[in-house]
Image: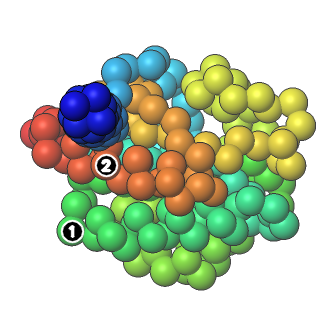
């Protein structure tokens, strides 16, 4: 009798644990899928794209943007970051309202011509992925004031984060641009914005 009661007790405990685990997993999935809240607004800035066209804070409006800081001669994380950005660029080729922005932290070397060649090497064939440059002072100011990244040791000490910016020019979330799991979460948030937030006409 005692043994039977013990077995029943174990079954109840195991069932409870199974239900609890399912609830936790469900809540975690819901949390990942929820659109991150606004962190801050991107401040005013002025830069030039690899095509020689001006790009500023107004260029973020009515667009969902994924932004990072890189330099073309980077021997460290930049190739991985650009590879992950390139994958997203290709995966969302049917979404013209989603743009990708890579800002050079080595503008002295990364001239417009160098950035254009880098864009070509990454298969950029439309306006959805832009490589931007400005003088180092402007780059450091945007890195620090705009995205709260350290900028004293640029170019080598640049952030490896991808930044999600909504159609109103607000920073929504940061992701590790070198980590597949973090990129997967970014992809989920992109899908959530594309589904639930319609850019203004």
Residue at image position (50%, 54%) is 181
Q: Which residue is mark 1?
A: 94
On screen, residue 180 versus residue 69, left or right, reads left
Rendered image: mark on residue 141: none
Observer-side mark, 1 or 2, equals 2
Residue 11 occupies which quadrant of the picture?
Answer: top left
Residue 52 pos. (x, y %)? 54, 60
Residue 8 pos. (x, y %)? 21, 34
Q: Is residue 26 visible?
A: no
Residue 124 pos. (x, y %)? 46, 75
Residue 147 occupies which quadrant of the picture?
Answer: top right
Residue at image position (37%, 62%) is 128
On screen, residue 160 versus residue 66, left or right, reads right
Residue at image position (46%, 18%) is 40
Q: Secondary structure at mark 2?
A: helix
Residue at image position (67%, 47%) is 160
Residue 38 occupies which quadrant of the picture?
Answer: top left
Mark 1–mark 2 contact, CB under 8 Å?
A: no
On screen, residue 27 versus residue 87, left or right, reads left
Q: Which residue is mark 2?
A: 188
Mark 1–mark 2 distance (CA, rounded to whole Å): 16 Å
First reached walking from the N terminus: tag 1 or tag 2: 1
The correct choice, above or below, for 161 with respect to 98 in the image is above
């Amino acid at each position: 009798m005692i043994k039977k009661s013990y077995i029943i007790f174990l079954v109840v405990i195991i069932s409870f644990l199974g239900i609890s685990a399912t609830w936790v997993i469900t809540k975690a999935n819901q949390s990942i899928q929820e659109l991150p809240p606004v962190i801050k607004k991107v401040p005013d800035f002025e830069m030039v794209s690899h095509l020689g066209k001006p790009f500023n804070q107004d260029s973020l409006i009515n667009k969902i943007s994924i932004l990072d800081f890189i330099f073309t001669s980077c021997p460290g994380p930049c190739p991985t970051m650009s590879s992950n950005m390139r994958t997203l660029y290709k995966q969302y080729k049917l979404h013209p309202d989603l743009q990708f922005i890579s800002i050079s932290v080595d503008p002295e070397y990364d001239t417009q011509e160098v950035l254009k060649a880098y864009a070509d090497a990454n298969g950029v064939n439309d306006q959805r992925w832009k490589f931007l440059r400005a003088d180092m002072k402007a780059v450091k100011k945007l890195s620090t004031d705009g995205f709260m990244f350290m900028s004293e040791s640029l170019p080598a000490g640049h952030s490896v984060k991808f930044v999600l910016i909504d159609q109103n020019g607000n920073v929504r979330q940061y992701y590790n641009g070198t980590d597949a799991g973090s990129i997967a979460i970014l992809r989920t948030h992109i899908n959530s914005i594309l589904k639930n937030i319609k850019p203004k006409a």
